[in-house]
Image (cartoon, coloured by chain):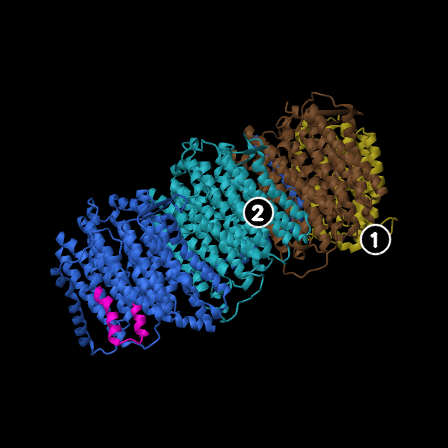
Amino acid sequence: MTASFDATHSLDAIEVLLALFLTASALVSLFDRHLVRACYFFVAFAAAMTAAWWQLGAPWLAAVELVLGVGLTGPCFFYALGHVVPGASSPLERDKFSEPWSRVAMRVVLALAWFVMVGAAIRYVVADMAYAPSEHPLLVAGVVIAATALGAFALHRHLLRRLLAFNLLGSAVFMLLAGVAGTSATAQALISVGLLVAWLGSMLGALLIRQLVHLEGVEALGRDGKPEEGAT
Amino acid sequence: MMTMLLALALLWPLVVIGWTLWSAYRAPAAYQSYFSALWLSAAWPALLLAYGGEAQWTMDAWMLGGEWALNSLSRPWLAFTALLWGLAAIHARGYFATEQAKAQEGDQDTQRRLLRLALLWPLTLLGNVLLIIAQDIASFYLGFALMTFAAYALVVHSGTAEARLGAKAYLMLAVVGEGLIIGGFLWAAGEADTLTLQGLREGILVAEQGAWMAALLCLGFGVKAGAIGLHVWLPLAHPVAPAPASAVLSGAMIKAGLLGWISVLPLGDEQISASLAQFGNIMLMAGLAAAFGAALYGVFQRHPKAVLAYSSISQMGMMTALVAMGLVAPEVWPLLWPGLVLFAAHHALAKGSLFMGTSISEHLPRWPLPLVWGLLALPGISLAGAIGAGMISKWGVKSPLYEMHHESLIKLLSWAAVGTAALVSVALWRQWQQRHKGGSNREQWGAWLVAIAAALLTPFWLPLPAGSIEMPPLKEWLGIMWPFPVGVLFAAVGWLLTRPLKGKSLPAGDLWWLYAGMVGAALVPIRRLGHYCAKLKAASVVSAQKTEEILMGHLTRLLSTESWLRHHVSGLMMLLAVLLAALMMWEGQR
Amino acid sequence: MNAAWLPLTALATSLLVVVIIFALPEDARRLRTTINLAAAMVKIILVTLMVRRVAAGHEDIFSFQVIGGVDFVLRSDALGVMFAGLSSLLWLCTTIYAIGYLEGSANRKRFFGFFSLCVASTIGIALADNLFTFLIFYEMLTLSTYPLVVHNGTQQALDAGRVYLRYTLSAGVVLLLGTVLLYSLTGDQSFSSEEGLGDYLNDHRGLLTLIFALLVGGLAVKTAMVPLHGWLPRAMVAPAPVSALLHAVAVVKAGAFGILRVVYDLFGIELSVELGVITALAVAASFTIIYGSLRAIAQEELKPRLAFSTVSQVSYVILGIGLFGPFGTVGALAHLLHQGLMKVTLFFCAGNYAEELGIHRIDEMDGAGKRMPLTSIAFTIGAFGMIGLPPVAGFITKWYLGVGAIQAEMYWVVAVLVASSTLNAMYFLPIVHRLWFRSGPAHGKGSWPKEQRLGRFETHSWLLLPMVFTALVSLGAGLFAGLPFSPLDWAARVANGEYLP
Amino acid sequence: MIWRFGLFDSTFEPLLSTHWALLVALGLPLMLGMLAALFPPKRAWPVVLASVPVLASGLMLLSAYDQAGLLRWHWDIAGVQLSLRLNGLSVLLLLMTQVIGVAAAIYTPGYLRLSETGPLARWLWPLMGVVLSALSLIWLATDLLTLYAGLELMGLAAVGMLMLSGKVAALVAGMRYLLLALMGSLTYLLGVALILGHWGRLDLQGLAEVVEPGPVAWFAAALIGAGLALKAALFPLHAWLTPVHENAWTPVSALHAALVIKASLFILLQLWSILLPDTFYAPRVIAWLGMLAIVWGGLLAWRTDSLKTLVASSTVGQLGYLMVAFPLLLGPDIAPLPRALAWEGFWLQLMGHAFAKAAMFMAAGNLILATGESTLKGLAGTSRRLPLSLLVFGIASITLMGLPPSSGFTAKWMLLQAMVISQQWWAVAALLTGTLLTAAYIFRMFRYCFDETAPRHRYQPLAPGMDLIALTLALIAFALGLLAHFPLELMHGGSP
């Protein structure tokens, strides 16, 4: 019924470190306006996720994450940035769109609410977490990342950053899934499908971003967030 | 046999119309004869029918159920009506000869007017015949309406401004009259659940509101019969209508109103209620008022036909009074009605010949003048009761009244006859003043002469029940004849007295001008109200448009939030999830 | 013996014609005309068959289940067949007229397609046996008349179409609500059921009144009862055959027919009286009658005047219902037919004047009687019928209504009738006067607004014949009202059915 | 409620032929799509030929259900439980998918030939195949994993299809849709995670037995609800929809509006009926939003100047009709009669709208293609030149307006009756207002079409059959009104 982390109790320290690293790299990746750096941090996050899957005893997922997350999704972002060779400069290096404060504030509130909600939900599922939240550092990290990523997703206008946020959210959700449901075959199947979808989505997104930049320039990437855009 | 005759009598006018139409369509205008021999014959089958004997017909398929009859009342009525129509038709042929010549020369306007008259004349006749033989309400009303509306063409014929005024007055009152009649019919027939006039009379007799029904119907028919207050169209329409049209209007059609009264009122029934009798009294007063008032007003008219019109009103007033006697004193009615029919018939022919006479005096034939004026005066004298059929008809109504001891009424009627005499003499005087030489042709004076003869000899040819009419005994002659000289004297005195007022006279149509003024005054606020409503509507349309514009502006602004929604979809989704979760938690915790 | 095919075929004929017309190309003029006329003939034959069967006491029913508890039912009963007869007869006339009228104009395929659809809807309305089926065809009618109203495609026509839809669709929604409420209360309620809704009276008095108000309110829009009449005068921009059809048969009559159904067959007259809604109906109808006449007087164009006359006249039908008695019912039913015949004649005439001479305003009609005698005679007959003068059919209904009013002891109704007749005379007689007694362009005075010589006779013979026919029928319906199978006779038969079950 | 979705044991095992039919129904669209990518058909007839087996498989499944009642399939692959079921509802939806899909496919060659579509055109075929296969899977699947996979497959393919036109606006809108759709599925997945974590299973039948109301069910329902609402374009999360349709190709729009968003709604209703059998407020919230959706969608469509936006906005409003039925389907204390009525009305409305909206998009596409104008004003005078396209549009719009005798009417009738019986007057008002608003925007469009005073311009002739396909769909939507008994009876059957 409840998922358990029993097998990994002894490795708490590693888990905590992993969780911390995941959270940190996710946050940087989400909020760094320097996009190339953000993408690098995403790759680092994906690598950490691979480790985390390994740590959780799901080698299959670790492999998938390695291939799809590190090997395929990461390059997708660099491709979208037009930053195929490391060191080359790109017009997309920085996100220059700015958001009004009200929007930021609203997103922060929403992200907090979402954090509370997801946290509460997880608490109800993993009954013992209420007593020892620190025993599930990866779960906590998952909740934090999920809420933040969603908030960031809602906040950003830059399409690439939204795509990044989506990927991070995806990973967080998978982590939560694994956290509450363990690494049963069903959960692994779900996560695999999710990873595949995330990759496909990222690839499609990257292609689109390239195409948009090609057709309209950088500005087109932020059009989605501009409130003054016409009704149709 | 009778049925065939009936069919012929009713269809013949239609055949005439069809033929006239056909020939108008076929023949070139230069050879166009509007008043062919066939046209003249329109009324003849009806006349024949009147002498064919009594008969009855029932036709379920006809309208609400047709019931027609030729009985002791409708036969004489049909006889004098058809005769007058026939004579007037012949007279018309002569009367319109000049116009026809003009039409043949190619005057389009005249062509149109003549064709119109030639078509609607038989139609009017048809209506008149139908209403006489009808015993069911629908047919009667059909005949009445047909006659009323078709006769409009007769009145308006000349198309002058006066003619249009006269026709307008005629039509307006006719519409009012039709409305009153249908209202009364519906009420009475609805209460009695009947479709026949017989049933209607019985219904009115027993109905609680019988007097009111009778009043409605009487007013309605009163328009046609020239009852006082509703008579105003007569002096307006008669002077302008062609002489033959005036003849049938005043002779035959006006009698349709009288026949209407006789048909719907439960006359002579012993069980007449008090209220009906009361109504009879009012009617009696109204009749006498008409008899005297019209005479008083009429003598001051300038136009001979207007004078004659007032004479008709006066005469109809007398007949109104006699009809009213059927309600006031039911026992007198069985004796009275043949006299009344004779009175009506005689008046029809006499008034017809008087009106035809006006056309004679306008186109005097090359006869010795005294002869002409003697002939012109003859029907008038008869009308005043001094000679011929007039005398007999006077006696015909007087004797039953004597028998039942209504001497006061007799006296009043005699004095009314004085008025008649005065009116007739004024009319003749006016004719003399406005005489013209030459031009009257054979048909014109032929029909006129026959009409005079028929008027003087009315009792001899009118198919009344045998023995209902007798010559007045010699000792009564004086009592019948005295009003005539008195009347002439009055007229002469009056003329002398009013000489100082040279050239001034009262307008024809008396109350019409009052009515017109009142209606005009009433229309002013109504018009103003109408204008106000129109203005209000326009204003509200404008303001509604303005409101709509404003609303649309708001709406457009509101809809621009769609793009806000678009940019906040993900935020909204987060909100929705949180909201749903919170709501369900809250509900679950309760 | 149930001949279910009969009502179905009657309906299907018209629908099939719609499909065929839409499938034919625009320029297949002859074929389209042939099909149109043939179908109209076939339908008259079918309706005649139905009349005979109903007269012999058979009522044919066709039904199938749509969803649980709701059936689609067609049934030929006396009342329905009466309406079907009217619509099929006038369809033929109007089709002939329309063929002549639209000679050479564009979009004829669309016109005739929707025209046929419109008539198919009226047949459906006539034969519908429950409110659901009725509603289907009622809404179909709304939709199929819209393209006809906007047919000319001018700004004015489009605006009129919009107004028309605003009224009728809102009414449709109200009607739908009423229907659904009724179904929720009683389930499927056939028009032919003997029970009526009397059982629900004690517990649901308010609800029943509400349902009645909704149903009748929804139907009253099409009936053009004041103050819901605003669409009708505007819809006059449509071509003349459409106006004729709209006024005489289809739309306006559908509403009146619906009210007849609701009062007589759904609620039952006793229940309606019990609810006290009948008197309200009579008062509303009377108000409409007077108001319509007054507004008609103020109009200066021919068609709007006729339109307001329709507003006034159709409420005679409603008034007849309101009189609660056999005579009133006979009057109402007969007027449904009579008014149709007379009004269609008048609109044909108006169309002829407009087509042949370009006359739209009343003051342009001077002396038109000489130029177009047959049209003017027909107009005169129609006008006299509207006034209610014998021998035109209008008199017959007025008689029955008046007598019904007296027997129901509603004396004021007679006053309304008389007043209306007088007002009618006030706005029709001047026109008749102008036609015959004034000299105008035909007498060499001025010229017609836009004269065309459309045919050998006074105008195109396709325009002339239907008009003459309807004029003669309206005359005949009055003159020979006593014949078996005359409108009056049939109305009396229906009324007997309602009052003597 | 749960039995209505066929979540109970079947009496019979499926026959061998049924297995094959299932395989064809699920796999063949995909295969054909791939094939067409290699050899893009230039004419309609190869597509017609190819669609015969697809439709045949649907009919076979229908007859199989007719004979045997509910059918179930169950597989266990490496510890992962996958299961499918075939009940009346899923047969109906499957057939609907196949008919609309086939129609869109037949429509496509003509459309591609006439419009300048660019090099990406051939990719439309496989994507279409994927969408159809995924949809078929969704109607049949009874475990959350298959549903998730189907949903994602469908969503990604749909995004791909919508962006094929390659215009910038299409790309921007498509990108937005892509991100939102992915986000929606992640939210959904989070909900699924909670379910899996708490009850340890994903098969719906099993879940239906074990789920009891509690915080986990509520949170899962909230997450799943929000995610799927986003994907189903339920108000107020609908705003991505119109721009997407504005720029997409006609057959794509038709498929998307008719089917793709319905799939999310289907899953939403199915999962909520398991998770929230007796919740009062959540369905109410959806219903309230539905009322707003009806008004909002109607207003949007009423004031727009673009034909495609009109059609797309009308989808928002029409979804509102479905949303207001939620309390009747899910809420507690609903008597059996209104619940049954609402259930049937819901699906009839869904199907009617699917057919009508597909037809409408095709008709609108035809009008735009022929006139070369995409604004309403550009339609002036089309009533004369393009009567058939307009007629199709008209018939489809009758269904949307819910005027008789269309399926929209019958559905509305049932919903109204259910609402009246359960006294939900606000919903009644919303439904009736929706009718009027729909009529307002539909006839606003017709008003332009009937304008005869506008100048004429040249029209591009349409490929043969393009109107006929649309007409067929519109007529199906129309005929479902009076013939509703037959499909609805299918849904009656198979109650345990």
Chain ID for yellow: A
Quarter of the rendering containing residue C329:
top left
**Quarter of the image that includes the N terminus of chain C:** top right
Q: Can you tell which mark lies on residue D299?
A: none
* Amino acid on which the number 2 mark rests in the picture: Cys
Q: Is residue C136 visible?
A: no
Tell me if residue A14 is in the magenta stretch: no
Chain ID for cyan: C
Q: Nearer the viewer, residue B246 or C128?
A: B246
Q: Where is mark 1, residue-wise?
A: A90
Q: Chain B drawn in what color? A: blue
Q: Where is mark 2, residue-wise?
A: C118
Q: CA distance from mark 2 to mark 1?
A: 68 Å
Report x, y in % for residue D333. Answer: 54, 29
Q: Which residues are magenta?
A: B355-383
Q: Secondary structure at mark 2?
A: helix
* Chain to which mark 2 belongs: C
